[in-house]
Image (cartoon, rainbow, N blue to C red):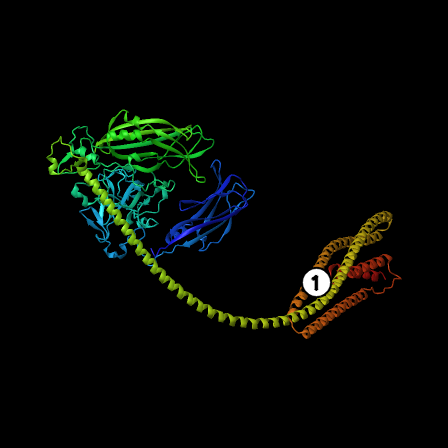
Amino acid sequence: MGSNPMQMIVVLVSEGRNFPKRPAHLLVFEAKFDGELLSTDGVEHVETPEVVQELAWQINKKNLQQHRLQRTPIKILCYAVDTRSSAKELIGYMVIDVRSAPDKPVKKWYHLLNTKYKKSKPELKVAVYIEALHNTEGGDTSVPGIKNADTSAVDVSQLKPELNDVEGVFQLGPPDRCKDIFTLSVTVAFAANLSELLPNAGNLSIDQQGFYFFYTLFDNDVLTDRFLDLLEPKMTAERASFHLCTGDKSLGNATVSLASLLEGDNSELNTAAVLEGAFELLPPAKFRESPRLQSQQPVVGLSIKLKREEPTVTATQQDSGMCLTDRPNSPEPSAQRAQSKERSAPDTADDYSDMFDSEEPSSVQPSVKPHHTNNSAPSSPAKASRGGGSLTTTSEHTQLSTQPHHYEFTLQLNSIANVHTDHHIFIYLRYRYPAFGSSAPFNTHPAVEVRRGCEHTLSNSLCTMDFSMSIGELRTTLSQNPFNVELWQYDQMAGNKYMGQATLPLLKLLSSACHSVKLHNKPAHQRIQTHTLPVNSSDNQRIAELSATLCLSDFGELPANLVIEKAQSPQESQVSGTSVTSPTKTPEYRAALELEMWKESQEKIFEQQLKEKESRMILKLTEDFRKRDMERELLCKKKVGENESMQQELQKMIQQLTKRENLLLKKEREIQQLEADLRHSYDRKLLDLKESSRRLEQECDHKLSLSKSKLEDCEEQKTRLKAELEAAAAKHQDLEKEFTSYKEQQGNRPEVKLQSEINLLTLEKVELERRLEASNKSKAHYKQQWGRALKENAKLKESSDEEAKKFAQKQIQELELMKQRLFATEEREIIKSEKRELADIKEEINRQQKEKSESEVSLKEKTTPVAVSTSRINPALEEQLKRLQEERDGLLRTGVFNTEDEIILEIERRIRAVIQSIDTET
């Protein structure tokens, strides 16, 4: 296995913290990986428990890679065990991913999940790493599991199976060197979902030829008994499987690799190597459909076992007439051995790990049993044979008077009721009865949730066992071996818990009424009974009631004629039936004596072989040690030379580093000097920038105060115009009243004079209406200008703030640029240029202010009214002219309006009209 080395997954539990102190309690940690559970020794339950224990699983590199791809986790459970009552309490757990496991231990703190100590929040310091296992013999490429002193020199090309017809075995390798006998057995336990393999899923009609399994080993095909029903296949648990066929067509096949039988530490195969599980049956390529669900896949349950046979007495004892042990005659065992077939779904193989058992049934009864007769004749050959404890043979054959019967025992667990529990729990039933040839336990599945006082039906609880036994042996077996059905509580977190058991009354089944039926196309006598049995706990208290149906079918005697060959010489056959021979002269005694002598000689040979093997191993280890010592010495010399060369290189590097360090110190001092100069210049420029920003802020404040004063003037002008508007309205009303009174007074004047007065009044009325309309328009315009002034004020303020920010940002950017300049002369020139720019800006601002003031003065001079002779001017027109001129000047002084605005133009038009009216009068 050089291409697939073995490795160890190691979990190191170092210590813990934040645990509460609990006297009389121990902390136990269990780690579960790939269905295998390992636990540490108990440590004291204190605040900081010291564990320092390792748990390890041995696995090959390929399987480790597979677990990493499947993200198989390692689950560590923490329990508190009470030392007084042995009660086990789950504290918490943690889950660690195998993918993150390094090659060296790296300890990390992990919090316990779902812990009962929620206040303290306990933690564990755990390291998970992969440790490689190195072979002690570097050149060993032999298959592990079969180690022999002589097989190292066997050529692989000679390991071809050859059938030995004499001994009934397959020979692998040279017969003079490969003498160990191994037994490979294949057992078909169950099959499920076989109907999925048919090309047409809707056609489940029974084929008259039936269906059967067969497997091929060493180019030999072995077939099982045929069955007709694919939905519920009934078949004897024979040791043959892999292909499902009907006629000469294969519906599906499963390939099982036997390499795992030779992995692990069981190198000598002293104990049986077992491969068990449910294997998927794949249909032929042309009938394959889309992928099915896990529960619908056709599977066949197999149990494959490989073990070494013990040394047996061979043909060397045949000259004494003895045959103690038979060699296996074929790869498939006798069909008359006790078999059991258990109907269970394949998807429960993971839930109940002991569905199959790796050991052979301990109570398998052979088909041939010596018949104990009541004949009192002392010269009976059969009795003499029984005295020796073995079967003797001669040329004479005697048929047994009684034959073993073929029985089929069926157990159906119907329901369970009145379970004494305080809360809802999941339960399942478990039993096994080795006396009927099945040492593998049977579990009902899936687990059923039960409630107090209710009756619950059990699913998948039917089990059928086939066995052969005589009537007397059956009664003796049933009386001496009770059939117990155990009740278990199913719990994934805390583990399954035993609750109690019920005993089936099998003896009552023999005394029940017998009915003749036909089963499996064979006549049989059947006895059926249904019982309601109490389930008692370990303290003999009733905790539930179990309803079970028992059925025993008798198919009659086995068809084969079983004979015993008498082992007497021709001289002994002529002795009278009444003669009595000495016990020490019987063939049985001589055979036993020879057997003991042979055992002693074999023990001596075995001890001698062990000594020779030990000496060879010591010589080999000594040679290996010498070679490794020389390799270590050469490696040490090589490492010393490498270290000396590395030391010289290090000295050169130290000298170079010293020179570089001095150079770096010199450059560091220069950099410090430059940094001090830059800091001094930076502080000086920062003061200048602060001073300039302060002056700019004062100017902005001054502009803001001017804007506010202009806004106040606009408010005052608005108030004054509102007052003038009200006065004009009052004056209009007064004129209306005067006009009315004047009209009444002038009612008696001539018509022409009245008409002229009327025209004059009409003109005045029109003028007054026009003025009223102009006042209203100016009022709306003033409101609009007021809003515009507010907006412009806000814009001015925002623009001043933005200018200040931009200026400050610009100054910051200039400071950053200044940091990068190295020469002070250039910085002084930049500062001078900035001062000149600031002076130019100030001069530009002063010039603009002077131009603005001059423009206002010129505007006032232009708007000064032309002197008119007022000697003959109407006072009303003069007053109106002054008022209009004051309004125009006030609006222009605000700075909001200019000479091109509509309201200024309207006022100018009115002024010109008033001047024209004055000129006409003069």
Give above or below for 570 relative to 144. above
Identify the residue at horizontal 72%, vertical 55% (top origin): 787
Describe residue 371's horizontal placement relative to residue 445 as left or right.
left
Q: Position of residue 51 (x, y in %)?
A: 49, 47
Q: Position of residue 416 (x, y in %)?
A: 39, 30
Q: Is residue 383 visible?
A: yes
Label 1: which residue? 804
Q: Position of residue 561 (x, y in %)?
A: 17, 35
Foreground of the two, 720 or 223: 223
- Neighbor class of circle 1 (other Cα within 10 Å; few <14, some 14-19, many 20+) is some
Disc 1 secondary structure class: helix
Residue at the limit of the structure toward the bottom, as seen here: 825
Q: Position of residue 465 (x, y in %)?
A: 29, 35
Identify the residue at horizontal 75%, vertical 70% (top origin): 843
Q: Amino acid at mark 1?
A: Ala
Quadrant in which the N terminus appears: bottom left
Foreground of the two, 529 or 123: 123
Give above or below for 11 relative to 569. below
Quadrant in which the C terminus appears: bottom right
The answer to which image quadrant residue 915 occupies is bottom right
The answer to which image quadrant residue 672 occupies is bottom right
Describe residue 122's horizontal placement relative to residue 218 as left or right.
right
Foreground of the two, 219 or 831: 219
Total labels drawn? 1
Describe residue 576's horizontal placement relative to residue 796 as left or right.
left
The answer to which image quadrant residue 303 occupies is top left
